[in-house]
Amino acid sequence: MIFQGLAPTVFGDLADMAGRRPAYIIAFTIYLGANIGLALQNSYAVFILRCIQSTGSSGAIALGFGVVADISTSSERGSYMGIVGAGTMMGPALGPVIGGILAQFLGWRSIFWFLVIIAGCFLIPFMLTVLETGRNVVGNGSVPPQVGRFLFLTVPNFVPTQVSWRRGYQVIADCPVRVGT
């Protein structure tokens, strides 16, 4: 619980300095690596890996609220915060049910392999498609992030980063996103 409590502070500061996207990628990579280690473990290192797992997961949860603050106006923010908050409550609600079914029929290691699959299915498309939202990095969306600044952690070259404005909407790659000032 100590790691779970301290990680949002570390990842929040990292996200404010380097951007939300690199912080998300680092958090999910830590989470993914810890889950792989947990699935393969037979010793007391499980305790340490569970601490590392909570570091990655709680860091990613905290970043969700920062992204909402980046992309929504203050008048819209409450409803989006509710959606993000509901998403974070789905884990404690559904996790014991899914984990119990997996452990009953496939063994306890299957829980961690399931988490590896879910995290991988999120992380790969995230790395390929999601643009930076941190206002310290991209301003109000008018500054493209520097490609190569954090190696693979920035927007890949093949993802369009051209930004234009049409009637109060920020258009990134021909996908309008409402952005407040």
Image: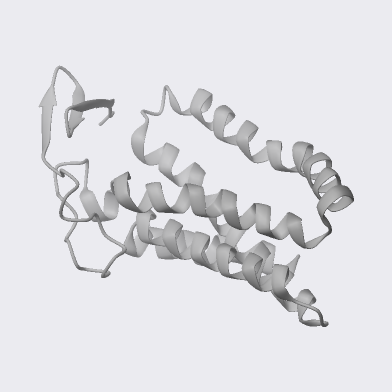
Name the residue at 61% across, 35% down: 87
Q: Position of residue 27 (x, y in %)?
A: 51, 62
Q: Is residue 117 above or below residue 54?
A: above
Residue 113 picture quarter: bottom right
Residue 63: tell me if it is visible: no
Q: Residue furthest front?
A: 105
Position of the C terminus, as image quadrant, is: top left
Name the residue at 69% across, 36% down: 90
Q: Is residue 35 above or below residue 142?
A: below
In depth, the one of 98 and 173 nearer the eye is 98
Residue 81: tell me if it is visible: yes
Q: Is residue 107 above or below residue 61?
A: below
Name the residue at 52% across, 26% down: 78
Q: Residue furthest right?
A: 104
Does residue 78 appear to the left or right of 106 in the view shown?
left
Name the residue at 79% across, 75% down: 47
In depth, the one of 121 and 3 nearer the eye is 121
Q: Is residue 129 above or below residue 26?
A: above
Residue 8 picture quarter: bottom right
